[in-house]
Amino acid sequence: MMAIDFKTTMANAEFPSIFLNASGVNCMTVTEMDEMINAACTGGVVTKSATPQQREGNPQPRYYQLEHGSINSMGLPNEGFPYYLDYVTKEHAKPTILSVAGLKMSDNIELLHKIQASDYTGLTELNLSCPNVIGKPQVAYDFEETDALLAEIFSFYTKPLGVKLPPYFDLVHFDQMATILNKYPLTHINTVNSVGNGLWIDIDTEKVVIKPKQGFGGLGGTMILPTALANVRAFRQRLNPSIKIIGTGGVTSGADVFMHLLCGADMVSVGTALLHEGVGIFQRLTDELTTIMAEKGYTSIEDFRGKVQDF
C-alpha cells in the first residue's frame, strides 16, 4: 500500500494526521486524552468541552446505542476548565484543541479572557452547539446573539479560535451564518454537533430510552452522515478560504472520510464509532482511505478535496 502524507496545518499547529476525536469522546480525563495523543494515525486531541467548573452532567441513563447510530443527552459532563487548560499548556507529541462551552454568554467571555491571559497558544474551539443542556438553547441558532458574541470576543481575543456549530437544514441559514462567520478571523469551524432533539422509544417497555429531557437527545452516528456532509459542503461553498473545516458526523469507514474530504473538510473527527471501536479505528480509517485513494490514482488529499461534482 502506498504511503500518503496525511499531515495538515491549522493556524499555528501542524497535525500529523487529518483525524481527531469528536469532543465528548475519549477526552474526558488525562488518561483518555493521552490515549488519543499516543494512538496511531491520530492528528491530536480535542478536549471535552470545558465549562467554568466541573459538571456531573445529566442524570443516567443518558446514552443509548441505536441500530444506525446513537442518541444522547450527556449535559456537558467534564472536569472543569482549569483541568483542561492545565493539560493543553503542557508539552504533547501532537497538537491539542481546547474546547470550551459556557452555560451563558458571560461564561464564554470569561473563559476566553482566561485563555487569552494564559500561556496557552494553541487552538481553542468555542462550542456554540450543545443541544443537551437542560434549559439552555443552542447559541448558534440565534444568529444575532452569535454575531454579538463573536464581536465581543474578537475585541480582545488574539489567539487561534474556531467554533463548533450545530447542523443547519435550510440553505438560507447557511447563507446567514456564513455571512456572520466571515466577518471574524476564525481559524476553523467544526460541523456538525449532534442533531438535536431526537427521540427513541423501547416498544417493550413503552418508555423513552434516555432519562433527561423526557427522552429528547442529540443523534449521532451513521444516520447523521448525510446531514454532516451537507453542512461541510454548504459552508465550504460560503466561507472565506482562510476558515478551515473539521467535518464531524457519521464517520464509520474510509468511504465516509473520503466523502467528508470531497465536500471540503480539512480534518475529520469521529465520535460514536470511536466510542464503540476505540482508538484503533483511526488506523483502520487511514488504511481504508488510502485504499480508496490508490484505486482512484490520488496521491494527495489535495487531488480531490472540495471537488465533489454536481450531477
Image: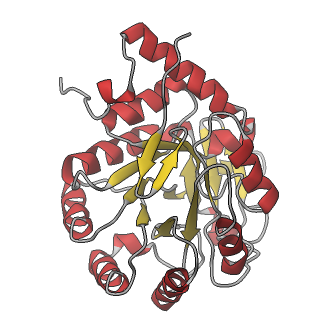
261, 140: nearer the viewer: 261
Residue 304 visible from this viewpoint: no
Residue 7, horizontal then vertical, whole percent: 48, 37
Q: Position of residue 76 (x, y in %)?
A: 65, 70
> Would you say residue 236 is visible in this rendering?
yes
Residue 134, image quadrant: bottom right
Task: From the viewer's perspective, tell me whether residue 284 is left or right of residue 300.
Answer: right
User: What's the coloring here?
Assistant: secondary structure
Q: Residue at x 42, y 65 (%)?
A: 163
Q: Is residue 164 left or right of residue 199?
A: left
Q: Residue at x 73, y 80 (%)?
A: 54
Quadrant assignment, res 87: bottom right
Which residue appears at 46% of the width and 15% of the height? 292
Point out the image quarter for the C terminus.
top left
Report the label total. 0
Residue 276: x and y, percent? Answer: 73, 39
Q: Where does residue 3 sit, x and y in percent of width and height?
A: 53, 18
- Report the side of 298 relative to 45 (left or right): left
Quadrant location of the N terminus in the rendered image: top right
Query: On the image, which quarter does residue 100 sit in?
Result: bottom right
* Residue 265 drawn above or below residue 310: below
Q: Residue at x 39, y 30 (%)?
A: 259
Left or right: 27 as drawn, with respect to 192: right
Q: Nearer the viewer, residue 49 or 204?
A: 49
Vertical comparison of 22 with 222: above or below: below
Residue 230 vs residue 65, the one in the foreground: 230
Q: Is residue 165 above or below residue 115?
A: above
